[in-house]
């Protein structure tokens, strides 16, 4: 007895999932390549470092500190900090952006998550730099611990917390979209 087996046909839902997976992979490769290209470009990273130095110096100026920017350093008569690549939050922001991109959310939610999260991490990093300046002025013996242990831990915690908040919001929106 011969049995007839119907040929396999992809459903519309399976096709949609496949396109979604492919577009997500393409986005990850493109964003990852661009992120890496900026990271290895001395000119680009120099501009990012200088931007952090300028913003940090401006905030310190508003707070009554007479600082100036020299290249990628913020200096005063009391103390100076140098903004190197690791001080830009570039790695933490990149990890956050990639985590947002791989999460199954709408592209609109992903774009909002990437832009808002990157802006928030920029602000957190500026707060970190300003605080490190003050630690260097008033508690120089604590600078290494605050810089390498306290702030690195806080930045990781902020990235995880931001992603969890965003993912929760994106999941809620996605569930509402399915029930509407």
Image (spheres, rainbow, N blue to C red):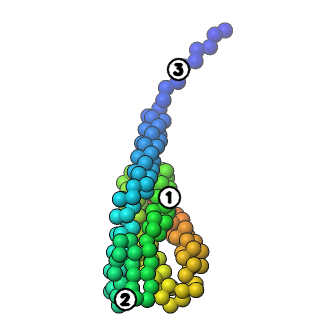
Using a 10 Å C-alpha cutoff, classify the residue at mark 3 as few (fewer than 14 neighbours), some (14 to 19) or many (20 or more). Answer: few
What residue appears at the point 57 percent right and 78 percent down from the top-left corner?
A: 144
Which mark sits nearer the N-terminus, 2 or 1? 2
Residue 8 relative to residue 16: left or right: right
- Residue at the limit of the structure toward the right, as seen here: 1
Query: In the structure shown, which secondary structural element does the residue marked by tag 1 occupy?
Result: helix
Question: Residue 2: which quarter of the image?
Answer: top right
Using a 10 Å C-alpha cutoff, classify the residue at mark 1 as few (fewer than 14 neighbours), some (14 to 19) or many (20 or more). Answer: some
Q: Nearer the viewer, residue 37 or 102?
A: 37
Question: Residue 53: which quarter of the image?
Answer: bottom left
Q: Position of residue 175 (x, y in %)?
A: 47, 55
Which mark sits nearer the N-terminus, 1 or 3? 3
Query: In the structure shown, which secondary structural element does the residue marked by tag 2 occupy?
Result: loop
CA distance separating discs 2 and 3: 74 Å
Q: Position of residue 76 (x, y in %)?
A: 39, 85
CA distance separating discs 2 and 1: 33 Å
29 vs 110: above or below: above
CA distance separating discs 1 and 3: 42 Å
Q: Nearer the viewer, residue 68 or 172?
A: 68
Point out the frontmost of discs 1 and 3.
1
162 vs 140: above or below: above
Which residue is disc 3 drawn over? 7
Is residue 172 something that shows in the picture?
A: no
Q: Nearer the viewer, residue 120 or 50?
A: 50
Which residue is disc 1 drawn over? 95
What residue appears at the point 43 percent right and 48 percent down from the top-left corner?
A: 33
Q: Position of residue 37 (x, y in %)?
A: 41, 51
Which residue is disc 2 drawn over? 65
């Amino acid at each position: 007895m011969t049995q007839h087996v119907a040929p396999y046909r992809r459903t519309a839902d399976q096709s949609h999932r496949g396109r979604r997976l492919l577009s997500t992979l393409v986005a990850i490769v493109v964003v990852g390549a661009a992120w890496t290209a900026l990271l290895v470009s001395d000119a680009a990273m120099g501009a990012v470092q200088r931007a952090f130095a300028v913003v940090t110096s401006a905030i310190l100026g508003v707070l009554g500190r007479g600082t100036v920017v020299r290249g990628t350093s913020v200096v005063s008569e009391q103390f100076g900090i140098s903004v190197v690549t690791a001080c830009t939050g570039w790695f933490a922001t990149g990890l956050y952006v990639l985590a947002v991109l791989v999460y199954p959310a709408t592209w609109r939610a992903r774009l909002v998550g990437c832009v808002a999260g990157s802006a928030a991490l920029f602000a957190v990093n500026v707060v970190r730099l300003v605080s490190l300046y003050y630690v260097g002025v008033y508690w120089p013996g604590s600078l290494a611990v605050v810089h390498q242990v306290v702030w690195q831990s806080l930045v990781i915690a902020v990235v995880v917390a931001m992603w969890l908040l965003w993912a929760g919001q994106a999941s809620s929106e996605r569930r509402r979209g399915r029930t509407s």
